[in-house]
Amino acid sequence: MSLLIKNGEIVTASDRYVADLLIENGVISMIGRNITAPAERLIDAAGKYVIPGGIDAHTHLDMPFGGTTSADDFESGTIAAAFGGTTSVIDFAIQYRGETMPQALENWSRKAEGKAAIDYGFHMIVTELTESGLGDMDAMTRAGVTSFKLFMAYPGVFMVDDATIFKALLRTKENGGLICMHAENGGVIDVLVKQALSQGQRAPKYHALTRPTRAEGEATGRCMALAEMADAPIYIVHLSCSDALEQVKRARETGLRGYAETCPQYLFLSYENYEEPDFAGAKYVMSPPLRERWNQDVLWKGLANGHLQVVSTDHCPFCFKEQKELGRDDFSKIPNGAPGIETRLMLLYNGGVLPGRISLNKFVDLVSTTPAKMFGLFPRKGAICVGADADLVIFNPHAEKTLGLRSLHMRVDYNPYEGTKVKGVPETVLSRGKVIIDNGKFTGRAGAGQFLMRKPFEPI
């Protein structure tokens, strides 16, 4: 199918200009003024931005956790992502202990195949690393899974020791992979959690109070040191606070290839949400937890000055009823995670671009271009250039929307941003040249998404 988008203002990570786009066979075939080539469909984008489709590099769809499973599977989650202007996700395949990485990839591929409405890739969560596991890491990079997530938290479930982290870093130095790190001091947190419970402190707010910013900062500094010793790049996921950001800044200033993402929840929500009455604070239980509000300004500055490179969502939704309520009498049993796959672009545009915290180009860079570069998808994804996949968003900066259950499509019974009014909305969304969101309706197809074979990591 051919499609012509006319008169839109094309916005990339570096440029802004008015032009037409001709799309043929799923890719951009021509960019120019006054294109008159015949096309099966014409879209007039005058007065609107045309941006590369968003890439959410941190999602957890159909993931078992805490005795339950995240509420969105690969069908509902990717459809919601498309409504929000995201056209590719990178989810996590979990290698459980006693399991090989190829087995884990096969298991998670089955979850996505026939369901994903947009393109998808995987990081590999490593929970143990034997000698044969090191070979599995090489096999994964050859299979297009070129990033590996390790945990410094959740002892007995996901947490690995420093030696395992160091061995993984050394291996990625050889095979072109990238280590993604959940940086919290899990041992210290475990002691604090047990202490709080023994003192009868069971409300949701104690999830945050037992995961102090120092625990995140210490772990971030430690994994930066391990990466320095291994002479390997490292990427910190869901960075939430000033303590951790200072460690990233210090490492980068010494020349380390250290990178980090943050998430909208840490830019818009705060510890105050845990004080909401009637157990409502459980809606915001995630790890790392929400922080004191002053951290938000620090994170925004980190995005503006390049110490934070990506905004992902860590989308891991659990319904308030039946799922979050599993921890009503014990905060440590509340499933960790919150919904966000659909609201990322709208929130970042409103909180970042409109008040002047970041430029429109930086906005595109954070939600699309740098994730594509970081995770081996650029310039096929994250770019508007001839030959790139026609993953595009026609973003209407004048349209307004109120975020909430009635206006969103995630399979969860609450929204952290309920009632928030935004200006600037993804209006039309294309995945490989096909319109999948059209005037507020999903016109794509579950199962149309393709697995993304990602290239080895290249420093940016």
Image: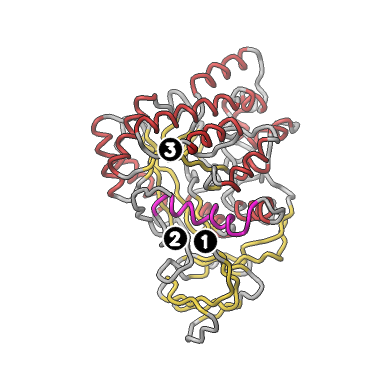
**Whole-percent x, y for residue 390 in the image:** 46, 68
Residue at image mark 1: 53
Specify the label residue 256 is tagged with. Answer: 3
Label 1: how many residues lie within 10 Å, few (<14), some (14-19) or many (20+)?
many
- Mark earlier in primary sequence (1, 3): 1
Query: Secondary structure under badge 3?
Result: loop
Residue at image mark 2: 381
Instruction: Name the kind of residue labelled 3 in the image.
Output: Leu
Query: Secondary structure under badge 1?
Result: loop
Instruction: Name the kind of residue labelled 1 in the image.
Output: Gly
Q: Are marks 2 and 1 in contact (CB under 8 Å)?
A: yes
Q: Quadrant of residue 181?
A: top left
**Whole-percent x, y for residue 74 in the image:** 47, 51
Q: Quadrant of residue 364?
A: bottom right
- The magenta span reads 358-376
Is residue 430 toward the left or the right of residue 379 in the image? right
Q: Is residue 344 above or below residue 380?
A: above
The alpha-carbon separation of the residues under discs 2 and 1 comes to: 8 Å
Q: Residue at x 55, y 52 (%)?
A: 366
Q: Main secondary structure of the magenta part?
A: helix
